[in-house]
Image: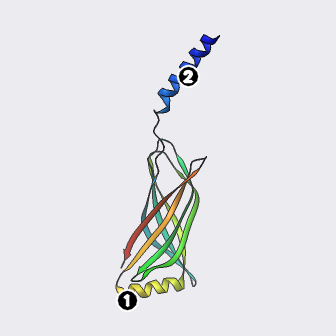
């Protein structure tokens, strides 16, 4: 009986040793801001489309529980807030790149201030700064991203 138990234990240890290091850990997806476009406007707000590209380098699909970001414009004295965008439950297929366009509403007063800087300076640096939260079932990993694009 003891001999069978030792044999099974030894076999289990060998199998565990063989397979425990064989699979590569999951890697973080890459997040890139591809484009920022004017999608529409009303009397009170301006809507931007922020196109984000996600690349999943893993052999399994993953879910982003949330993607949130803020949009700013830069001046000589710092950053001025324009708006906020976000989306939940984005699916990233295995070993693929996928694009998601996420809308951002901007108050027209903030848009007019940014337009004034654009007219005065001749260009307007726009910054998108955010995080993508990867749902790993037992925990969530946040991946920061930022893109700067000069308009004008």
- Which label belongs to residue 120? 1
Quadrant location, the C terminus: bottom left
- Which label belongs to residue 12? 2
Percent x, y of residue 145: 45, 62
Judge left or right: residue 23 versus residue 123: right
Percent x, y of residue 89: 59, 55
Q: Residue at x 53, y 84 (%)?
A: 108
Percent x, y of residue 52: 46, 61
Q: Is residue 30 above or below residue 123?
A: above
Q: Is residue 128 above or below residue 135?
A: below
- Which label belongs to residue 133? none
In what element is the residue under mark 1? helix
Q: How is the image coloured?
A: rainbow
Q: Do the residues labelled 1 and 2 touch (CB within 8 Å)?
A: no
Percent x, y of residue 4: 61, 12
Q: Residue at x 47, y 27 (%)?
A: 18
Residue 85 picture quarter: bottom right
Q: Which of marks 1 and 2 is nearer the N terminus?
A: 2
In what element is the residue under mark 2? helix
Q: Residue at x 34, y 84 (%)?
A: 122
Quadrant location, the N terminus: top right
């Amino acid at each position: 009986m003891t001999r069978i138990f030792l044999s099974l234990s030894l076999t289990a240890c060998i199998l565990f040793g063989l397979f425990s290091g064989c699979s590569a850990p999951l890697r973080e997806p890459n997040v890139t801001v591809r484009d920022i476009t004017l999608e529409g406007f009303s009397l009170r707000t301006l809507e931007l489309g922020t196109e984000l590209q996600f690349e999943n380098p893993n052999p399994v699909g993953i879910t982003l529980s949330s993607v949130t970001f803020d949009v700013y414009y830069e001046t000589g004295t710092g950053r001025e807030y324009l708006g906020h965008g976000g989306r939940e439950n984005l699916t990233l297929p295995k070993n693929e790149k996928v694009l998601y366009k996420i809308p951002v509403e901007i108050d027209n007063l903030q848009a007019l201030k940014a337009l004034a800087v654009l007219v005065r300076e001749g260009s307007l640096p726009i910054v998108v700064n955010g995080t993508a939260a990867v749902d790993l079932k037992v925990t969530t990993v946040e991946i920061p991203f930022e893109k700067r694009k000069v308009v004008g």
